[in-house]
Amino acid sequence: MSGADLAAIIFASGFTVLVIAIVAVLVKLAKLVDAASAAIRETGDSLVPLLDELTQATKSTNNQLVKIDIITDSVLETTTSISSLISTLADTIGGPLLRVGEIVRGVTGLMGRKKK
């Protein structure tokens, strides 16, 4: 056996080991891809009902927000009406009461002067 034959045998052996290593890596990679595909499939299967529930929750929330808007508008109208009522009462009753107070103060002032 010559040196060239020995080198060819060593090269062939090394190449065989390399091919076996590559095959082992490819087998593991194939298992990884299968596992990832199964995980994606399971996630997709559970994601559809979750999205349906999320859609229903969003619709329900929007309905509640519409009701809250109506309540807020009613509270605003009520507050405006109460403010107007208080202003009207203050104008209607407050003015005469101030005049009565001024008259009472004037009368008590006059009575205080007469005592001296």
Image (cartoon, rainbow, N blue to C red):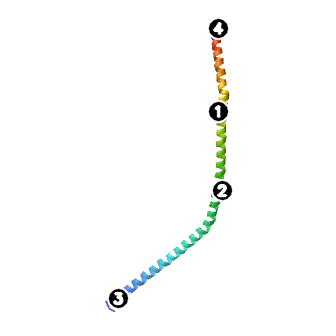
Quadrant of residue 52 in the image?
Answer: bottom right
Say which residue label 4 marks: 115
* Cα distance between the residues tagged 1 and 4: 41 Å
Residue 17 locus on image (x, y percent): 42, 82
The answer to whether 76 is drawn above or below residue 33 in the figure is above
| In this view, the mark in front (3 or 4) | 4
Kind of residue sitting beneath label 4: Lys
Quarter of the rendering occupied by the C terminus:
top right
Say which residue label 1 marks: 87
Kind of residue sitting beneath label 1: Ser
Which callout, 3 or 4, points at the residue further toward the start of the chain?
3
Question: Are discs 3 and 1 less than 8 Å apart at CB?
Answer: no
Provide the secondary structure element on which disc 3 rests.
Answer: helix
Residue 34 locus on image (x, y percent): 54, 75
Provide the secondary structure element on which disc 2 rests.
Answer: helix
* Cα distance between the residues tagged 1 and 2: 41 Å
Residue at figure coordinates x 63%, y 16% from the top left? 106
Say which residue label 2 marks: 60
Residue at figure coordinates x 65%, y 60% from the top left? 56
Residue 109 locus on image (x, y percent): 63, 14
Residue 108 locus on image (x, y percent): 65, 14
Kind of residue sitting beneath label 3: Leu
The answer to whether 20 is drawn above or below residue 45 in the figure is below
Say which residue label 3 marks: 6
* Cα distance between the residues tagged 2 and 4: 78 Å
Kind of residue sitting beneath label 2: Ser
Quadrant of residue 91 in the image?
Answer: top right
Which callout, 3 or 1, points at the residue further toward the start of the chain?
3
